[in-house]
Amino acid sequence: MSDGPIADRGGETMAAQVGNGRRPVRRSGAEGALALRGAAARLGLKPGELELGVRLGVVRTVAGPEGRRRVPAAEVERLRSAEGFPDALRERVRSVTATEGAALLGIGPARFTRLAKVGCFSPVTFYVNRYRTLVWLYPVVELRKFAEREPALLTGSTPRNLRKLLDAGEDWRARNWRSRRVAQLAGEAEDAWERAAVAAAVLGAEQLPEVVDDPYERAYLRRLRASLLPAKDEPPSSRPLVEPLLTADDPDEILWHRIGLALCLDEARAERPAPRPGEAGRPGPVRPAPEPAAVTGRMRPRTESADGAAVRRRTRPSGSGRPTGRTERTGPSGKPAPRGLRRWLHRSPSC
């Protein structure tokens, strides 16, 4: 299945010219590391639980052959020696559906869904059930943290500002899932070109050429692009439900990823140019880094960790009456954007 295909005239041919269409082989730190299935067995987890642990930052991985992630042996031993193993580890990687999450928080499923739609907590993954319905899954640890942080949102009337969002048809679940997934993939990237490819993966076909005017750079980003979906294939019947989730669709979100991609490209071009036909696999000459400009630095994507810490939560003005808790939108390229830019982009009210 394609995740957010990048339609570019001649793109497939050009991608074949500059590379074989596969991500480069990476082996950094992979010696002695375990494949994900083997690590899951050592940790007493199901493969799906380990995958969620990786997404939540509970389990550290390194790149292995053909870009496959592996778990260092030292990381496995660290987790096994932690207090409360294995039950504590299973709890940290446990996720629940909306119905199960509502029972956990002591509220009705409808209220849980409303809170999720306005971004009070973010899904970590999803699946399509046998009735062809999209089912979101939420980390248990983060739900518990939300209940401790915002008990007022679990009882009584929904605050007015959140009701206005719901009445307007807002639904941030897919957007927040993309943000979390982009953060993870950008954190696993090994250079600026790979970070740029993460941002490019969620931009639609009409957006990418506006940011990347060089067709060889677009082909290279296409070659490096990582999938937002799990490794397992989705059945064809699920595609109409899944494919819309893979592309940014909100103007603010699109702008954020465009800015992140542009910043990553500046950094990537300073490291080396994108390969041209006949030079795939040969790194280009390293150019000196440019002088710092007014908008510099990587916007390291950040999201909630498995410990439930909302990283870079947007704050509300004193006395505004808006509850806090929505995860801040972050770009795919590294460090946070400059303060003024962040204020400009983050205009939506938060939980």
Image (spheres, grey):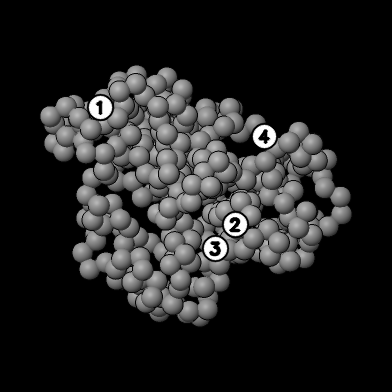
Element under disc 1? helix
Q: What residue sits 39% from the left and 21% below the top?
A: 209
Element under disc 4? loop
- Mark 2 to mark 1 CA distance (whole Å): 38 Å
Residue 161: where, in percent of width, then height?
Answer: 79, 39
Q: Are marks 4 and 3 in contact (CB under 8 Å)?
A: no
| Residue type of the residue flagged with mark 3 | Asp
Q: Residue 348 bears which disc, if any?
A: 4
- Mark 1 to mark 3 CA distance (whole Å): 44 Å
Element under disc 2? loop
Mark whose residue sits in front, 4 or 1: 1
| Residue type of the residue flagged with mark 1 | Met
Residue assigned mark 3: 307
State which tag comes first along the sequence, 1 or 3: 1
- Mark 4 to mark 2 CA distance (whole Å): 32 Å
Q: What residue sits 74% from the left and 48% below the top?
A: 114
Q: Are marks 1 and 3 in contact (CB under 8 Å)?
A: no
Residue assigned mark 1: 14
179 relative to 156 in the view: left or right: left
Mark whose residue sits in front, 4 or 2: 2
| Residue type of the residue flagged with mark 2 | Asn
Q: Residue furthest toward the front?
A: 237
State which tag comes first along the sequence, 2 or 1: 1
Say above or below: 28 vs 343.
Answer: below
Residue assigned mark 2: 129
Q: Residues within 10 Å of mark 1 (few under 14, many from 20)?
A: many
Q: What residue sits 66% from the left and 46% below the top?
A: 119
- Mark 4 to mark 1 CA distance (whole Å): 40 Å
88 or 315: nearer the viewer: 88
Q: Are marks 4 and 1 in contact (CB under 8 Å)?
A: no
Q: Residues within 10 Å of mark 4 (few under 14, many from 20)?
A: few
